Amino acid sequence: MNFIAIKMLVGNRAKYIGIVVGLTFASLLITQQAAIFLGLMTRTFGFLTDTALPDIWVMDPKVQYIDDLKPLKETESLRVRSVEGVAWAVPLYKGLLKARLPNGTFQTCNVVGLDDETLIGGPPKMLEGQLANLRSSDAVIVDIVGANGKLARTLPDGSRVPMRIGDTMELNDHRAVVVGICRVQRTFQSQPVIYTTFSRATVFAPRERKLMSFVLTKAKPGQDIHALCQRIRETTGLAAYTREEFKALTVRYYMKYTGIPINFGTTVVLGFIVGVAIAGQTFYNFTLDNIRYFGTLKAMGASDFVLLRMILLQSATVGAIGYGLGVGTASALGLLTGSTELSFRLPWQLLLFSAVAVMLICAGSAALSMWKVVRLEPAIVFKN
Amino acid sequence: MSKLLWKDTVDSANSIAVHCKGLTKSYGSGSNQVHALCGVNLEVRTGELMMLVGPSGCGKTTLISVIAGVLERDGGECLVFGYDFKQMNSQEKTRYRGKNIGFVFQMFNLIPALTAAENVAVPLIINGVKRREAIDRAREILCRVGLSDRTNAVPAEMSGGQQQRVAIARAMLHNPKLIVCDEPTSALDHETGHKVMELLREVAVGVGRAFIVVTHDARIFEFADRIAKMDDGYIVSVESLRTDLSNKNNTNR
C-alpha cells in the first residue's frame, strides 16, 4: 500500500507542493534564524576561542562578559604568578580605541595588548608578516576583515585599497605601523582587531590608573584547573575562570541582558507556526480531499492500521523533503554569506533541533488526519 | 472466522447469499431520528442479480451499506453467506469485506493518482498479493472488460463509461462472493449505462456470486433477475424477471 500512499500524495500536485513549500519555509526559518543566533552567540566569545593558550582568565570580580572591561593594576599579574600551581601569568590589554586613518577618518578598533616578552594571546593565524614583528617600533597587526573593510582606504575614484603591511595610522595621536595581517574570529561588535604589545597598548590608550584587562594564566602540568581557579580567587580576591566558564559567563550575559534570544526565538517560533499553519493545515486538507478514497480503501478491506501507515508515510515523505529543502537552503545561504558580516553557525545539534521541529509539525498534522481516518465510517463511500 | 451461523445452504448453487429479516436502522436521535430501514425482509440468492429500486430516501443505500458491512444495523438479522457482521469485531469485518465483497460506486471512486491497472489491483494488494502480480492480474481483467489499451491511463484520461468498467474490474478482480453496486449507471448516458450493465451481466454474474444493484434507472431493469421495490424503509414487493435463474446465469457466465 506504500506506493498507493505516495502516488496519492504526489498525485495531488497543488497540495503536495503546498505542504512541501510550507515545511521548507518552516525548516528554513527555524534553521536559518537559529543558525544566525548561534553564530552571534559564538561571536560573543570569539576572542576567547582565538586565545587558546591560557588555561585560566583572571579578572575583576565584577566583570560580567568578555567586553565588560574593569581594569586591574598591573601588579595583579605578579600576585597571580605567586599562586601555587601557576606556571605563568601574563597581562593582557583589551579595549576600544579610535584609530585615525590616513584619509583622516576615524574608526573604532578593538585593540589587544599582548605581554611584551612572550606575546602570549596573539592571533591564532598570521596571514602576512610574523607575530614577532610586533617587537619593532610602533608595530601593530591588523585582522584581514578589518584591513579589507573598515580600515581600507577609499580612493577618489571610489575604489577601496585594503590596509597592508607598511601602512600607518594613528591611535590616540600615536603612530602605528602595520607589520602583519592576521585572521581572527569575527567579534560580536564587528570592529577591526588590532594586536600590539601590552606596553604599546597602554601608550595608545587614554591615561588611566589601571590599564590591564585580564591576567592570562597557565597551570602547571597535572594541576586541577578548577582547584587552581579556586586558589587564585581565594588568594587574590579576583575572579578566575577557565576558558569554557568565561565563554558560558559571556553567553549568559547576552542571553539575559540583550533582546537577542527573544528576537531570534520569536522568529523560530514563527517558523514553527508557519509550518503548522501552512503545512499542517494543507496536509489535513489533503486528507480531507482524499477522505472518499480512504473510505473506499476501508470499505474494500484496508484496516485502520494500513491506512494510518499510509498517512504516516505521506507525512514522513513531505517532512523529509521539506526538511531537506529547508536545511539545504539554509546551508546554501550560510555558505553564500560566509564571507559577509552575517553570522551563521550550523552544528549538527541545530540540524537535529530543526528535524525534531519539522517532525513535530508532521506528527501533529498526521495525527489530525489519522484521527479523521480512524473515525471514518466506510459507509461514506455510498454518499455522493 | 468462527461466526458462520447458517451453513446448510452456503456455497450451493442458487443458495441464499444474503438473508435479511426484520432489519432496522435509524439515524439521529430523539425528535431528529430518521428510520431508514423499518424491518426489511430480503433474500438474495447466489448467481442472481437483484436490483433494489425505489424513490430517493427510501433506504436503498442504507440497506446495501448494512449488507456490505460498512454500516452497523440497529436490529433484526442480516447474514451474508452465513456470516453475521454484528458477531464480528472490526478487524474481522474488514478482513471479510476485503475477501468477499466487491464494490461498484456511482462516482466510481477510482483513486485519481493511480492508473487503471493500479486502481483495479487495489483489492488484491489489500489482500496481501504482491504489487507486480496484482497489477499483472489487473491488466488481464482490464482486457476482459475491453480496456486493454487503457491500462496505463489515469481516471482523468478516461470517459465515465471507461471509468465504470475499471470500477467493475476492480470489484471483480479478487473474485468476491457478493458485489454491491450503488447507482452504477446514474453518472452515465443511456447507451454507456446499457453497455456497462451488459458487461456486468457478461463478466460478473455467475454461480456462487450474488449481485445487488441499487438503481433509479428504469432503463436497466431488464438486466435484473429480480427487482425488490423499497419505500419508506420497507421492501414493498419483489418481482422476478427471470424464472430460470440457473439457466440464465449459466448462459451469462
Image (spheres, grey):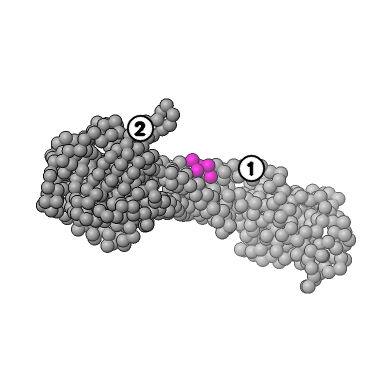
Q: Nearer the viewer, residue B240 or A289?
A: B240
Of the residues shown, which amino acid type is indicated by label 1?
Ile
**Label 2 CA crowd tier, 10 Å (few <14, some 14–19, many 20+):** some
Is A304 displayed left or right of A241 in the figure? left
**What stretch of residues is rendered in magenta?**
A272-278
Residue A277 in the magenta stretch? The answer is yes
User: What is the chain letter for disc 2?
Assistant: B
Q: Nearer the viewer, residue A339 or B25?
A: B25
Residue A209 in the magenta stretch? The answer is no
| Residue found at the very far top of the displayed protein | B31
Image coordinates of residue B87 in percent, x first then y, are 39, 50
Q: Nearer the viewer, residue B210 or A313?
A: B210
Q: Secondary structure at mark 2?
A: strand
Examine the rendering and report whether any part of residue A150 can be seen.
yes
Residue marked by disc 2 = B35
Image coordinates of residue B9 in percent, x first then y, are 25, 53
Q: Which mark is residue A262?
A: 1
Of the residues shown, which amino acid type is indicated by label 2?
His
Which residue lies at the image location 35% right of the left edge and 41% below the top edge? B76
| Residue found at the very far front of the displayed protein | B8
